[in-house]
Amino acid sequence: MNTDTIRERAFRLWETGKKEKAWQLLLKTLELRPDDRLAGRKCAEILKSLHRFEDILKLCASFLNLKPDDIEIKKSLKRLKTG
């Protein structure tokens, strides 16, 4: 199964309220393609809904290690850190 298929399946799970299962699939996607921005953003959305803010910070930091010039992720990380 390719990363696009895994990601789309995770999105469908998210839409049906299966957040934990969706998150697990998105993590698999990020293992295969750590720079997958869509998977990363949805992962952050799921983590936010689960009030797992420390995990969101780690996710954003990991993404910025791969793409340090990503302005949107930098802004999101700053907002999370400042509350």
Image (cartoon, rainbow, N blue to C red):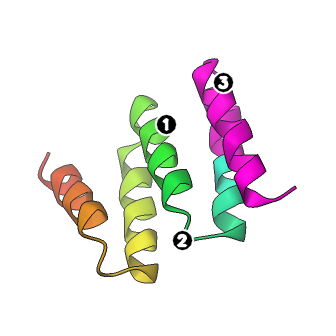
Residue 78 versus residue 71: which sits nearer the camera? 71
Q: Position of residue 34 (x, y in %)?
A: 59, 70
Q: Which of marks 3 and 1 is nearer the N terminus?
A: 3
Q: Position of residue 82 (x, y in %)?
A: 12, 52
* Residue 3 within the segment the image draws in magenta: yes
**Residue 50 placement (x, y as % from top left):** 46, 31
Kind of residue at disc 3: Lys
Left-right relation of 29 to 65: right
* Local crowd size for mark 3, using a 10 Å CA cut-off: few (<14), some (14–19), many (≥20): some
Q: Which mark is nearer the camera, 1 or 2?
A: 2
- Crowd rating for badge 1 (residues with CA inside 10 Å; few <14, some 14–19, many 20+): many
- Helix, strand or loop at label 2? It is loop
Q: Earlier in the sequence, mark 2 or mark 3?
A: 3
68 inside magenta stretch: no
Q: Mark 1 points at which residue?
A: 46
Which span of residues is magenta-colored?
Answer: 1-25
The image's mark for residue 2 is none
Q: Residue 61 is drawn in which quadrant?
A: bottom left
Q: Is mark 1 on a helix, strand or loop?
A: helix
Relative to 37, does residue 71 appear above or below in the rendering? below
Q: What residue is drawn where x is 72% and y is 69%?
A: 32
Quarter of the figure with the C terminus: top left
Q: Residue 35 carries which label?
A: 2
Say what amino acid the circle numbered 1 marks.
Answer: Ile
Q: In this view, does 81 lie to the left or right of 4?
A: left
